[in-house]
Amino acid sequence: MKVIRNYVNEMEALVARSVLEAHHIPAVVLRDDAGGMLPAMHFVYPVRLAVRVGDAEHALRILDAPFEGDPYIDDLLGPDDAAGHP
């Protein structure tokens, strides 16, 4: 397993894991917060998102991809290109 991202908030890590799993990339969220009893520990020990080593590069590309309909991306690439259409 390889840690690809650190998060202060567990919910952000869980959303990122869901995005990866929707793309058929297994991922795990690792946290050191005494089993949920000390959520403030995330400031000292961030929540980590890990994937298989072979999936790490592809997972980062998915997480870094722009959202369809993002006004900045639409202005930069044009609405057809940003949506992935030729």
Image (cartoon, rainbow, N blue to C red):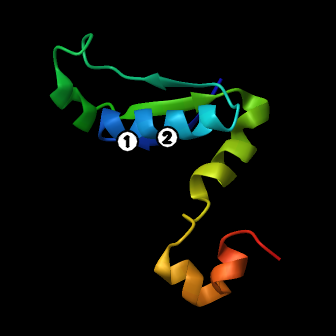
User: Label 1, on which residue?
Assistant: 12
Please state if 10 lies on the left or on the right of 38 as rendered: right
Q: Nearer the viewer, residue 83 or 3?
A: 83
Q: Is residue 82 placed above or below 17 in the rendered structure? A: below
| 62 and 74: which is toward the camera | 74
Quadrant of res 68: bottom right
Residue 83 located left or right of residue 36: right
Q: x and y percent of residue 57 in the render?
A: 73, 45
Query: Is disc 2 surrounded by few (<14), some (14 to 19) or many (20+) residues within 10 Å?
Result: many
What amino acid type is highlighted by mark number 2? Ala
Identify the mark at residue 53; answer none if there is no mark: none
Residue at point 65% right, 25% down? 26
Q: Residue furthest right?
A: 86
Question: What kind of residue is marked 1?
Answer: Glu
Is disc 1 in contact with disc 2, using a CB cutoff of under 8 Å? yes
Dividing the image into 4 quarters, which one contains the C terminus?
bottom right
- Real-space Cα separation, disc 1 to disc 2, in angstroms: 6 Å
**Secondary element type, mark 2:** helix
Figure quadrant of residue 85: bottom right
Q: Give the residue at mark 2.
A: 16
Q: Residue at x 27, y 10 (%)?
A: 35
Q: How many marks?
A: 2
Identity of the residue drawn at 33% across and 36% down: 11
